[in-house]
Image (cartoon, rainbow, N blue to C red):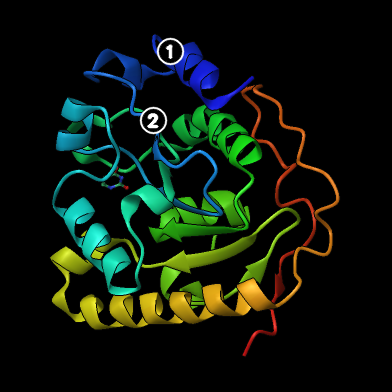
Amino acid sequence: MDLTKLSASLHDCQRCQLSTGRTQVVFGTGNPQASIMFVGEAPGFYEDREGIPFVGAAGKLLTELLQSIGLERSDIYIANVIKCRPPNNRDPLPDEIDTCKPFLLQQIALIQPKLVCTLGNFATQTLLEKKVGITKVRGQVIQLKHFVLFPLLHPAAALHQGNLRVPLKEDFQKLKTVLEQMSKTPFLPNASSPPTLSTSKAPSKEVPADPPTQMNLF
Ligand code: URA
């Protein structure tokens, strides 16, 4: 299985109710060999229309933030936890996350990024497998079994709440430092082999199997 085949296999996905309201499945985009991956929540109006994650206002802000630390969209891979737009951009439901999560985990297993930046609560809680608020964990470097997790505020939240813009920018500056540190420091002590992932409906525990540990990069 490669990313193209995985994407094709989801083209006509009807595993959950979101299939009835979507225009198309929004699988993910970017560099399939990227060492940095960003994970958002779910496609919105523009993403549903274009079939590409983060092409609306939040996407423009994300692109600017990436550029502020010397990254282009083509340097990274971007996907969402949920691949189909929820009606009226409502929050994803737990069963929708459970249904779609295995495909995110498969994307991660195929791309094998060193660092995964989760944007907002849903992506962070999905990969951390813990109900923790994004404002508590944002900007922390968390070692999971196969990659380092770096949770960030969701750019859409910063668009709605102006007071979140500065912390989001600060976290991107920290991300720059983390990337510099990671390029010098050996890490991923447990990552001897890529994760084996299932595509069953049950939420997979494989990627974050070990308890997360706070990395001592600073
Ligand atoms: N918000 C997300 O979480 N994902 C998108 O693709 C767009 C907005």
- Side of 142 where 124 appears, left or right: left
Q: Earlier in the sequence, mark 2 or mark 1?
A: 1
- Side of 161 where 169 appears, left or right: right
Q: On screen, 72 above or below 9? A: below
Measured from the top left, where is residue 36 in percent x and y?
A: 51, 56
What secondary structure is found at the residue carrying circle 1?
loop
Residue lying at 76% horizontally and 40% vertically, measured from the top left: 195
Measured from the top left, where is residue 177 in percent x and y?
A: 50, 82
What's the residue type where badge 2 is placed? Lys
Which corner quadrant of the figure contains ligand 1?
Answer: top left
Q: Are marks 2 and 1 in contact (CB under 8 Å)?
A: yes
Question: Could you give the CA–CA distance between mark 2 and mark 1, rounded to whole angstroms?
Answer: 10 Å
Quarter of the figure with residue 173: bottom left
Measured from the top left, where is residue 110 in percent x and y?
A: 63, 35
Q: Give the quarter of the figure containing the C terminus.
A: bottom right
What secondary structure is found at the residue carrying circle 2?
loop
Numbered tag placed on residue 83 in the rendering? 2
Numbered tag placed on residue 13 in the rendering? 1
Residue lying at 61% horizontally and 23% vertically, measured from the top left: 201
Q: Give the quarter of the figure containing the N terminus.
A: top right
- Side of 187 where 101 appears, left or right: left
The crowding category of the residue bearing disc 1, from other C-alpha atoms within 10 Å (few below 14, some 14 to 19, many at least 20), is some
Measured from the top left, where is residue 79 in percent x and y?
A: 41, 41
Quarter of the figure with residue 107: top right
Residue lying at 41% horizontally and 36% vertically, measured from the top left: 93
What's the residue type where badge 1 is placed? Cys
